[in-house]
Image (cartoon, rainbow, N blue to C red):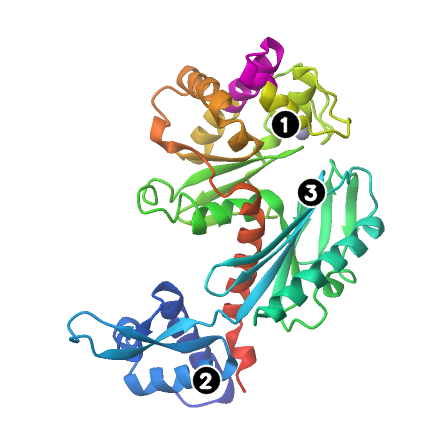
Amino acid sequence: MSATPSPGRVGDVRRQNLALVLAGIQRNGGATRAQLAAESGLTKASVSSIVADLLESGLVRETYVTRDGERGRPGTGLVLNPARGALAVEINVDYLAVGVLDFAGELTFHETLERHNRGSKPADILPLLVAMAQRAATEAIAAGVELLGGELTVPGLVDTERNVVVAAPNLGWADVELSEELPKILPDAPFGVSLANEAKSAALAELWFGQGADHGTSERFRDFLYISGEVGVGGGLVIESRLFAGPQGHAGEIGHVVVHPDGPLCACGGHGCLETFAGQDAIYSAAGIDPDSTSQQMDQLLSRVAEGDERAVSAVEQAGRYLGIAVASTARVANISAVVLGGHFAVLEEWIAPALRRSLNRHAPGLIPQGNVAFSGLGQTGTLRGAAATSVRRILSRAYELIP
Ligand SMILES: [Zn+2]
């Protein structure tokens, strides 16, 4: 790295070294300057200089740590600063939600507003979201957390470069541009608000906070398909611990894998997609519960399956059977052998899991071991955590912007 100095080149090297040190702190919270130097291959002097910049930026802070072999003498370690955070805002078909994740990875605020958003225009929904985001930001400030950026998730295909919701059929949105609306969600945040797909955020949450982060399962869940069960069925493909997005960012859309050639018309315009059998409304209809009634359909469904109501049980089992068909095919195409199910699939685990396993055994025998079929434990917060954590990573990747 001893080339002719030029401002651009020096800038690049400094950025790279900064990224190395920051990644070390992110991976190993509490690492000392000496450990960061050993890990990164940088000199202790460079690490100290970079750490000084990072402390000044507010992205990291010092903490007193006791290391093995130091006879209890406390040293000074570095952690991401929990007084910084990111916001996540979620639009779904039957609710809006907002959450705050601090840099320590704690979800410090979470609010959900049940609302039927099908057919709602962006102009109806966005003021509600902005108000929810303001409440979250106020709570964060009161708790001493400064929000530096955020992410908005929608149940549909997005173009993150142009801030366009390309298609969210269950909302009735097509080619909706949000470039002017996104900054209103978090007006003072230096890194702004980006757009993301709901299921892909939830897949990342599973990787970072769920099965992929659990010591017992993390080895098995480095490569997996995440399936999100909402009104729509979405998905995210994680390969080698990274989201595989595909050329336009739309890979993993398992909800629109065809499972029946003569199946019903889907919101996407096709016929016989998995969503038409395993989406929330499809299960309610098959169970004899009106999907458009305002009462708590999931509670009704749960009590009916618990009572052994034949129609309700067979609706849920049918969803499990078709899930198995779609997973069997996808697993072969993508060469994966693990799957995580979230949303209503996780809520219905007790009844859906046996049907799904039977279906997998029938359509892909031996391909997906029983322990590799997991149900998310993150509940309603998965998407918010994944979205906010993506925002945190984006902020850290642009840390140099906060350094004079
Ligand atoms: Zn479809």
User: Which amino acid type is shown beneath numbered disc 3?
Assistant: Asn
User: Which amino acid type is shown beneath numbered disc 1?
Assistant: Asp
Look at discs 3 and 1 and give the one toward the viewer: 1
Magenta-span inclusion, residue 137 = no
Q: Quadrant of the C terminus?
A: bottom right
Q: Residue at x 78, y 42 (%)?
A: 173
Q: Alpha carbon of mark 3 to alpha carbon of mark 1: how far?
A: 19 Å
Look at discs 2 and 3 and give the one toward the viewer: 3
Q: Position of residue 86 (x, y in %)?
A: 58, 63
Residue identified by numbered label 2: 53
Among numbered discs 1 and 2, the one appearing first in the sequence: 2
User: Which amino acid type is shown beneath numbered disc 2?
Assistant: Asp
Q: Is residue 32 visible?
A: yes
Q: Residue at x 75, y 61 (%)?
A: 179
Q: Alpha carbon of mark 2 to alpha carbon of mark 3: how far?
A: 40 Å
Residue identified by numbered label 1: 299
* Badge 1 residue CB within 8 Å of ligand 1: no
Q: Which mark is residue 92?
A: 3
Crowd around label 3: few <14 · some 14–19 · many ≥20 (10 Å):
many
Do the residues bearing badges 3 and 1 touch, measured as CB atoms within 8 Å? no
Do the residues bearing badges 2 and 3 touch, measured as CB atoms within 8 Å? no
